Amino acid sequence: MTAVTSRPERDTTDETRARGRRAWGWLRQQYALGILLVLLVVASLASDAFLTSRNLENLVLQMSVIGIVALAQLLVVITGGIDISVGSVLGLASVLCVGMFGGTSVVLGLLIALSVGAALGAVNGTLVAFRGLEPFIVTLGMLALARGLVYAYTEGTPVRPADPLYSLPGTLTVAGIPLLGIIWIGIALLLAFVLRNTVFGRRVFAVGSRREAAHASGVPVRSTLVSVYVIAGVLVGLGGFLLASRVGAGTPTAGTLMELDAIAAVVIGGARLAGGQGRVFGTVVGTMIFGVIANLLVLLNVSTFLQDAFRGALILIAVVLATLGTRAARR
Amino acid sequence: MEIEEPAGGIAAGTVVFSARGVGRTYPGVVALDGLDLDGHAGEVLAVCGANGAGKSTFARLLAGQEPPSSGEIRVAGFDRPVAGPAEAEQAGILLMHQEPLVIEDFPIAENVWLYRLRAGGDVRPWAGARRGADPETREVLREVGLGHLDPATPARELGPGQRQILALSRAKVTPHRVLILDETTASTSEEHFREIQAMVLREKEAGTAVVFVSHRMPEVFALSDRIAVLRNGRLVDVKRTAGTDPEEITSLMIGDAVRALERPPELPRKPGRPVLSVRDLASGSAEAVSFDVAAGEVLGLYGLVGSGRSSVARSISGQQDARAGTVLVEGEEVHLRTPAAALRRGVAYLTEDRRREGFVADFTNGENLTLATLDRRSRWGVLRRAAERTRVRELIGRFAVKGGPDVLTSTLSGGNQQKVCLAKWLEADPTVVVLDEPTKGIDVGARMNIYRIIHDLCREGRAVLVVTSEAEEALMLCHRVLVLRDGRAVDEFDTEHADTEDLIRSALGGAAA
């Protein structure tokens, strides 16, 4: 081989420069973090109730389940797909985990929720990876299917579990922090590790960025895709269980329109819907932005109808801001 | 946007387009250099040349698809140099590609009227609604020789030759003065050539200046009035077709025969038993190709566009399924269906389409370099990032890749991208390395680097198969060169004794052989 040894001193300057570039690049991408900070200031000025510990605890509880679902969505979006069935699958997992076997055991309930999520995720993933179907259409079908099953199973009324322990995970606090929030952040850290430090994570990015190149380099594209949808399903199933636990029942409307919040959080967090880019940290921040907005609107007694409109407007503004950021970065 | 009917307006023989001092450079490559050429009304001008002579570049410049780097091209009746497809249309220039411009999902009839969908044209939503069995469309189809087909048939049901004819039917419905056929006949059979010939004759009578870009001597002589020969971006000569013969044109295309400047390292005295054996492989346009490559040997596959050279390479390495034939790696028959399977068996494939298949666009050099060998850089599925980084630095140093491990590969020059792709495969320690056009889009300086890396491969005892469309490259890189023509291996040369003329003549075949 032609041995070209670069001089060490040049190497270190290159290294420092690269690190500096990366830090600057990272900062420039943190539009979402900026929005969140501004929102927090506005919220604490606008309402005295915002910074109370009771409200903050409530806020964490509201965000956690959506946060977990957004992380599932992030994984799918990085592969260049989209999963709009997350809300319905969450609803189905939620009602089945309390309803099946009469809701006699929490552990059994949790297993049911995870299995439901995994199974429906596997269906989505198989159709996308092996039949080559559009993720949007596949998960659109799954959205209707799962929600229909939810209504059929509950007949429109909430299902309550027999075991009182069901409510424990959703209401427990550790050192003043809700367990739900801890689980959310724990999953975020785990997913960040997987995406950054594992072969699987590298493959997910490769498949999302340039599928042909990944395939030509020996990456098992199809099994990677199926795994992604199954993992996303499991996370959504867990979200369903935690929601049922927090509410104390499996409600037929659980998770309705949650795909909207999840996708919005992922996009505001800097992920590219075409695939190949996305960060866990950004998605967590994106979730928080929506959480704070929703919380503030409630505190300010804005009508629920207007709340939805606000949310929609915010999605549009945030996405525009986010794309401004990437365009600047490209220059 | 209507232009006057060309037929009556322009007398045969008047100059329709004139190129003066036209040059085109790409980073590191001079594709076209100071070309002066005129096109006359009612005349077919053939543009000939070997691979990379600048034929297609000239076609693109004439059609206004890209601006020349120097000089200008004027078209009669248009007051400025043509810039962009819209102006080309106003000036009456029609370019027909090698790949027919046909929308598969549209019926034949709508493909005829495709040009009406162009941007900036008629924007009424009800305009250009489905046209089918109207007499005008039928008449057009009948004239180009597709009259026996139902105009409502989807274009996808047509064969490649018929598609080409369908695309050419556009000449019937678009007013034009210049018609450029860029390798249009490369994928058509003889039967369709006759239809194209009839069409070209009609065009001539109508007073069109026809430019026929091709390297097929029989067709050039059947169609053209004058022949312009290009070589290495320069116009060598323009001959009257009546006053020359294929032998002379071929000689002009080849120029001075070139022997290899650089030679691959000597083979070991006794070449080992073959590492890669291919028997009667049929795939894509290749039919029954057989060869052996020994350890430490570089075998070249040389041929013109459509000769089947890439199909052979792609089916050996699991990128494409073969129709028939066997592949043996180290004496063992293998059926490699996917690149992953090929990699496990020690077969690596460097793609011709670097941007699509070579590297991941959003990945840094480091990430791309280890993509094929992630298993080796990890334990229990967790990457050993520190070790990965060290290894990546070593590779970047050894292959002299510009930029560090954290630079996006997509931002590098072609040569450096290719080094990253090569290094990625060599990391997998393959026994067989298949290289498809390893220096495509790479400037001259970086080429030598790539050649050196490839010669190092054979010193390390790997079997190397190089697919190339450049005769000189084949001679410099390989021990032996197999020439493919129309899907078959027609000749084999020992590069120590062969020169570019041998290869090009063999690849052109026919009259010049």
Image (cartoon, rainbow, N blue to C red):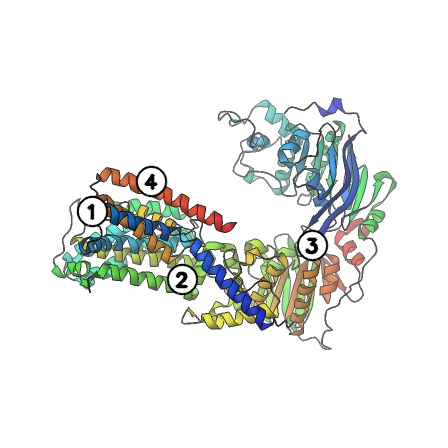
Q: Which residue is mark 3?
A: B28
Chain ID at mark 2:
A
Q: In the displayed structure, would residue B209 be above or below residue A257?
A: above
Do circles 4 and 2 both sit on a common chain? yes
* Image quarter hosting the N terminus of chain A: bottom right
Chain ID at mark 4:
A
Marks 2/1 in contact by CB < 8 Å: the verdict is: no
Label 4 crowd bin: few (<14), some (14–19), many (20+), radius 10 Å: few
Image coords of residue B462 (percent x, y): 63, 71
Disc nearer the start of the sequence (1/4)? 1
Distance between the alpha carbons at the discs numbered 2 and 1: 34 Å
Image coords of residue B392 (percent x, y): 53, 69
Type of amino acid under label 1: Pro
Nearest to the observer: residue A281 or residue B381? A281
Q: Which residue is mark 2?
A: A195
Distance between the alpha carbons at the discs numbered 4 and 2: 31 Å
Type of amino acid under label 4: Ala
Residue A313: mark in rendering:
4
Q: In the displayed structure, would residue B177 be above or below residue B222?
A: above
Q: Residue furthest right?
A: B243
Type of amino acid under label 2: Leu
Q: Nearer the viewer, mark 3 or mark 4?
A: 4
Q: Nearer the viewer, mark 3 or mark 1?
A: 3
